[in-house]
Image: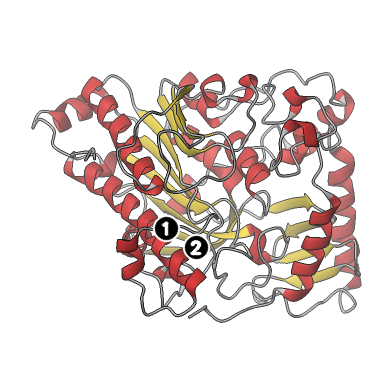
């Protein structure tokens, strides 16, 4: 087994400081993690000391949202800083191309969109993505073609956690992997991220950006015997495995932070951590005080814990209840890099150019904002309006209020700042506000430049409806 060391020459930190006055940038992304599944957010069963420490070192965002409650469109919004419905990315990718009624080259993140990799590479950064991609398997969608100098991981949405040389879907820059530095996939991804970062440190020629995109704790539910042994006190077998999977993810975060600390780079690195969507029904996750689950537009599907850490630049131990979004990662990273966002590419032929012009005039080219002034306490929190559409559901959050429309029952209005469980439907009591939000939602849908480029099976509409009604606030599994 390969062990990535943190030993570097004593002159390394001096060289780093002299050659680079812009921060390194690190995204750590969990997959299907529940809102309550950190010690910091209330779990009494899991052990996440390194993520808890990360939260204490920086700013914890209690009202952070992702752009979808399923993996693939959520990642599309993160990587572009644009609402994915604006370019037709609405549904998940979970089948082969033959199962979808669209051209194979459209099944993924459109080359007409700039990615986080494109943006930061244009700003002079070395870029890498390690782990889960899930944004298309066509050659035009490959991470190496989408702004990432280095890619190691899987193009698909899930993977066995114990890969073998003859049975896996993992690659490094287009070449199938032949060996693994760790037998457990989460540890291997940590190894790979550290290996690449070390290579950049040795070159010391440019700042770097890494997206460490863990697939944990997404199914299949698999953990090492050693990690499982730490959670023998949990009687629920699925929750026990989930706890062990989260422990491995947390261990990886600790290893990366330890390396950055030992090489005097921790204060030179802006880190953000969150999950791509809320906890799923099938992995033993727990959404804490929130109702809803992956696939639902209730808070438990789209609201995630988000942590920003940059010692010396952001305050430590701060909590903010301001509404923030994964859409904000791109403009925040570009601001930290001292660079401007790239102008949008020309619209592809399948987009309505008139609608696109109208949408850009109304909502702007990008949907995220630079969070640095807000995180530092230099400016007041911005009033945000966020939209969602998925599997027969639409939703808008504007200020404190959130309207959800559904295919199977009347719309509902919640004040989610005080009603985390979305238990008090205010639709009839505040009809004027509901109608106002309906209008905003309708105008947004009418502004979209394209229809969805592919759809989910109608089965998922039924699943979303069932979860909406049945998945209320639950106690932590034991």
Residue 372 image position (x, y, % from top left): 46, 45
Q: Assign a secondary structure to mark 2.
A: strand
In this view of the protein, can residue 378 be seen by the observer?
no
Residue 135 image position (x, y, % from top left): 63, 34
Whole-angstrom CA distance, mark 1 to mark 2, is 7 Å
Asked if residue 383 lies left or right of residue 40, the reply is: right
Note whether 324 is above or below 291 in the view shown. above
**Res. 410 mark:** none
Q: Residues within 10 Å of mark 1 (few under 14, many from 20)?
A: many
**Residue toward you, 291 or 232:** 232
**Which quadrant is the N terminus positioned in?**
top left
Q: Earlier in the sequence, mark 1 or mark 2?
A: 1
Disc 1 to disc 2: CB gap under 8 Å: yes
Note whether 314 is above or below 18 in the view shown. below
Q: Which residue is the site of mark 1?
A: 59
**Res. 320 mark:** 2
Q: What's the residue at 73%, 60% (across, down)? A: 297
Asked if residue 274 lies left or right of residue 88, the reply is: left
Q: What's the residue at 63%, 28% (across, down)? A: 137
- The residue most toward the left is 10
**Residue toward you, 151 or 382:** 151
Q: Assign a secondary structure to mark 1.
A: strand
Q: Quadrant of residue 352?
A: top right
Residue 457 image position (x, y, % from top left): 82, 48
Q: What's the residue at 73%, 30% (across, down)? A: 107
Q: Residues within 10 Å of mark 2 (few under 14, many from 20)?
A: some
How many marks overall?
Answer: 2
């Amino acid at each position: 087994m390969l062990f990535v060391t943190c030993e570097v020459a004593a002159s390394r930190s001096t060289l780093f400081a002299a050659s680079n006055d812009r921060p390194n940038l690190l995204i750590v992304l969990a997959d299907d993690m529940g809102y309550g599944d950190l010690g910091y957010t209330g779990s009494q069963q899991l052990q996440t000391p390194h993520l808890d420490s990360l939260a204490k070192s920086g700013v914890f965002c209690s009202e952070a949202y992702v752009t979808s409650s399923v993996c693939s469109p959520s990642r599309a919004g993160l990587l572009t800083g644009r609402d994915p419905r604006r370019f037709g990315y609405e549904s998940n990718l979970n089948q082969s191309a033959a199962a979808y009624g669209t051209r194979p080259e459209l099944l993924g993140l459109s080359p007409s969109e700039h990615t986080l990799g494109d943006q930061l590479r244009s700003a002079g950064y070395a870029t890498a993505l390690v782990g889960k991609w899930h944004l298309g398997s066509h050659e035009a969608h490959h991470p190496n073609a989408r702004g990432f100098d280095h890619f190691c991981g899987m193009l698909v949405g899930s993977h066995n956690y114990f890969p073998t040389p003859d049975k896996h879907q993992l690659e490094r820059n287009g070449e199938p992997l032949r060996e693994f530095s760790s037998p457990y996939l989460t540890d291997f991804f940590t190894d790979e991220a550290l290996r690449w970062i070390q290579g950049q440190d040795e070159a010391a020629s440019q700042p770097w950006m890494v997206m460490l995109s863990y697939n944990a704790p997404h199914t299949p539910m698999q953990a090492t015997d050693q990690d499982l042994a730490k959670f023998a006190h949990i009687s629920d077998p699925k929750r026990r495995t989930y706890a062990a999977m989260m422990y491995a993810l947390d261990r990886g975060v600790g290893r990366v932070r330890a390396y950055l600390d030992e090489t005097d780079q921790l204060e030179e690195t802006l880190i953000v951590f969150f999950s791509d969507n809320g906890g799923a029904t099938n992995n033993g996750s727990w959404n804490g005080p929130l109702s809803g689950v992956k696939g639902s537009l209730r808070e438990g599907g789209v609201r995630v814990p988000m942590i920003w850490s940059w010692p010396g630049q952001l305050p430590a131990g701060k909590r903010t209840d301001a509404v923030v979004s994964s859409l904000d990662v791109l403009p925040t990273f570009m601001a930290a890099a001292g660079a401007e966002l790239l102008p949008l590419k020309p619209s592809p032929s399948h987009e309505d150019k008139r609608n696109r012009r109208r949408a850009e005039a109304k909502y702007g080219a990008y949907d995220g904002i630079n969070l640095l002034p807000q995180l530092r306490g230099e400016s007041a929190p911005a009033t945000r309006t966020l939209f969602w559409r998925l599997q027969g559901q639409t939703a808008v959050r504007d200020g404190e209020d959130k309207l959800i429309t559904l295919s199977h029952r009347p719309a509902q209005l919640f004040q989610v700042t005080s009603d985390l469980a979305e238990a008090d439907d205010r639709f009839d009591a505040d009809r004027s506000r509901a109608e106002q939000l309906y209008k905003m939602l309708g105008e947004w849908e009418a502004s979209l430049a394209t229809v969805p480029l592919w759809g989910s099976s109608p089965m998922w509409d039924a699943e979303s409806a069932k979860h909406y009604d049945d998945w209320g606030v639950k106690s932590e599994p034991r």
